[in-house]
Amino acid sequence: MFEKNACSINGGDSEQWTWQEYYNKRRELEKEGVRVILVDMINDPVTDSVPLSNSLFKGEYPEGTYFVLYCHSGGSSGHLQKQLVDQLPQYHIVNMAGGIGLYEEDLPRQKINIV
């Protein structure tokens, strides 16, 4: 399913969410019973992510599931997102803008005073 050039910088104009949008939309969608799966493309897992694999899209998740792909910068995941949209019309495929480089845990920020 994945071509050898999937790791590319050609994904910049894909459908994207920021990390904050991901957290907000995930909460909203899951309240409606829609699955949202965060997909790790770079073997750098974050909270609630699953690793990318060919079997990930083979029926384990119901139609309408959102797969949110992240890589290092958003370029490779955007390139792959554009390929998967046509191949998997039963799912929503979204690219994480900025990739892991802009990752923010879904927790309140605390100010740290440096003396």
Image: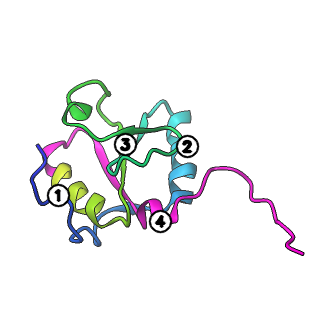
Work out which quarter of the rendered image holds the C terminus and state it: bottom right
Q: Which mark is residue 27?
A: none
Q: Which residues are magenta?
A: 86-115
Residue in view at x 85 percent, y 73 percent: 114
Residue 96 falls within the magenta-colored stretch:
yes
Work out which quarter of the rendered image holds the N terminus and state it: top left
Q: Residues within 10 Å of mark 3 (few under 14, many from 20)?
A: many
Q: Amino acid at mark 4?
A: Gly
| Residue wearing tag 1 | 6
Provide the secondary structure element on which disc 2 rests: helix
Q: Quadrant of residue 16 in the image?
A: bottom left
Nearer to us: label 2 or label 4? 4
Q: Which mark is residue 66?
A: 3
Give percent across and percent down for residue 49: 44, 40
Give percent across and percent down for residue 8: 20, 66
| Residue wearing tag 4 | 101
Q: Amino acid at mark 3?
A: Tyr
| Residue 17 in the figure: left or right of residue 31 | left
In-front residue for pair 31/6: 6
